[in-house]
Image (cartoon, helix red, strand yellow):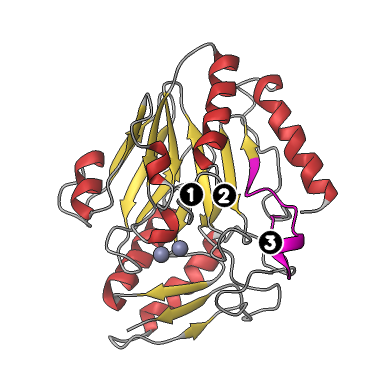
Amino acid sequence: MSKYTLLLSCLCFACITACSPSSDGPLVDLETQLWIHGSPNCNENSDPAIQVVQYNANTWILRQSKCTNYEAPFMFLFFGENKALLMDTGATRDEANFPLYNTVNELISAWEKAHESSIELIVAHTHGHGDHHAADAQFDSKANTTVIGLKVADVQEYFKIDNWPDNQAQLELGNRTLDILPIPGHHATSIAVYDKATGLLLTGDTFYPGRLYVNEWSKFKQSIRKLYDFTLNHDISFILGNHIEMTNSPGKDYAMGTIFQPDEQALPLTTTDLAELNSRLRQSGNDPERIVFDRFIVFPIN
Ligand SMILES: [Zn+2]
Ligand SMILES: [Zn+2]
């Protein structure tokens, strides 16, 4: 992390109490935001285990250090007036190496103090892979906290989505409504989350600047089409996935398992990127194929 980013992150921490809740504009530019990106030698790495970036008055983006797990997943925290939603708990269970609960709890405590109200925390998952729920246990049996289970039935039940994956649902955080869309293909439990307040669309491991591992080809194609159709009718600022695996060179990814990504691509993808993927998938048949795009790679694994 550069000194500049560190300074920016500190300034944003200060903003928890200094900024008015109504100042909802972005505090950072996600297209130029630098993230902790590992080190050739993690013994000499001084990054925090979790980088915390405040996106706006009520939204935070967290990234796990590659020096705790090479997957370095992103996590997202949204505040409404009476509920907060944490999407994902990262790739490391151990609290000493990866203090996610403490990090989130500090953000919540500061938010509660600034707003003179208490908030309930919901912990949900973009999907059920282990690099996105490893720290769930840190949140179990904590006050005012609900951790949603990892099976399709758990996700369906909590969000009240019948007829999975065709139907969708909304989650009300209090003057902030999120749309929840099932998008299986990478994983059976994959969901997308759309936040109307910021225009952010979370797409988990289904669509991000990296290798889009496809387990079920036809479901993946349907889910990308569903996401594309959704973007036609909604204002989207950025599409944010869970990892970065691409370099800044078009079509070139980092090796699997790398712990140092000094030239990684920016996190956000755009509706143009999604339209390009959907259009190309419409031309593909029933057989899974590896397709290299400038900013991501479709990567069937069956
Ligand atoms: Zn995954
Ligand atoms: Zn993942």
* Quarter location, residue 19: top right
In the rendered view, tell whether residue 60 sits above or below residue 108.
below
The amino acid pointed to by label 3 is His
Q: Earlier in the sequence, mark 2 or mark 3?
A: 3
Within 10 Å of disc 3 (Cα), the crowding (few <14, some 14-19, many 20+) is many
Specify the label residue 97 is tagged with: 2
* Residue that appears at 47% across and 65% down: 207
Vertical side of 20 occupied by 214: above or below: below
| Magenta-highlighted residues | 35-53
* Amino acid type for the residue under numbered disc 2: Asn
The answer to which of 95 and 280 lies nearer the viewer is 95
Task: Name the one closer to the observer, 134 or 108.
Answer: 134
Q: Earlier in the sequence, mark 1 or mark 3?
A: 3
Q: Which residue is mark 3?
A: 37
Q: Residue 140 colored magenta?
A: no
Question: Where does the N terminus fall, quadrant-wise?
Answer: bottom right
Q: Tell me whether circle 2 and circle 3 mark residues in contact (CB < 8 Å).
A: no
CB-based contact (under 8 Å), mark 1 and mark 2: yes
Give the CA distance from mark 1 to mark 2: 6 Å
Report the amino acid beneath label 1: Asp
Q: Residue at x 73, y 71 (%)?
A: 40
